[in-house]
Image (cartoon, rainbow, N blue to C red):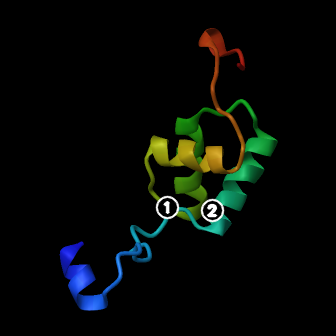
Amino acid sequence: MLRQHRETGDLSPRPHGGGHTPRLSAKHLKLLSAEVARRPDKTVEALREHLHEQARVSVSAPTVSRALSRLDLSRKKKHGGQRA
């Protein structure tokens, strides 16, 4: 903060520096959304495998889960295979 104040004379926050590029593009999200609409009982792991087979993209189960959250699609299930 001192260096920023010395160099610019201002202490306002700087813009975000970026971050990792998303592994799932809009095309991948559309494919994921279509598969959930077609087969709503698929698990996150099965959806991950579907993405790998169809789009040749390898992502983790938490990445798929976060993508589903962004699409407002809940994947929480009750024990015994019943939907929450």
Q: Nearer the viewer, residue 31 or 77?
A: 77
The quadrant holding residue 3 is: bottom left
- Callout 1 amino acid: Val
**Mark sitting earlier along the chain (2/1):** 2
Position in image of residue 52 (x %, y %): 52, 55
Label placed on residue 57: 1
**Residue 55: quadrant of the picture:** bottom right
Q: Is residue 32 above or below residue 39?
A: below
Sort mark 1 into few (<14), some (14-19) or many (20+) by Cα contacts within 10 Å: some
Kindly check if marks 2 and 1 are in contact, taking CB atoms under 8 A apart as contact: yes
Which label sits on residue 80? none
Q: Where residue 56 sits: x, y (%)?
A: 51, 63
Element on which disc 1 rests: loop
Q: Residues within 10 Å of mark 2 (few under 14, many from 20)?
A: some
Q: Residue furthest right?
A: 38
In percent of width and height, residue 16 lies at 43, 72
Instruction: Single out the residue that lies furthest toward the front.
Output: 9
The quadrant of the rendering that contains the C terminus is: top right
Relative to 7, residue 32 above or below:
above
Query: Farthest top residue?
Result: 80
Q: Position of residue 15 (x, y in %)?
A: 44, 76
Q: Residue at x 68, y 34 (%)?
A: 74
Q: Is residue 27 above or below residue 66?
A: below
**Mark 2 sits on what residue?**
28
Quarter placement of the N terminus? bottom left
Residue 71 or residue 42, whichever sits in front: 71
Q: Amino acid at mark 2?
A: His
At horizontal 73% and vertical 51% (from top left) the residue drawn is 33
Q: Please give left or right for residue 40 compared with residue 23 in the image.
A: right
Separation of marks 2 and 1 at Cα, in angstroms: 9 Å
- Mark 2 or 1: the one toward you: 2
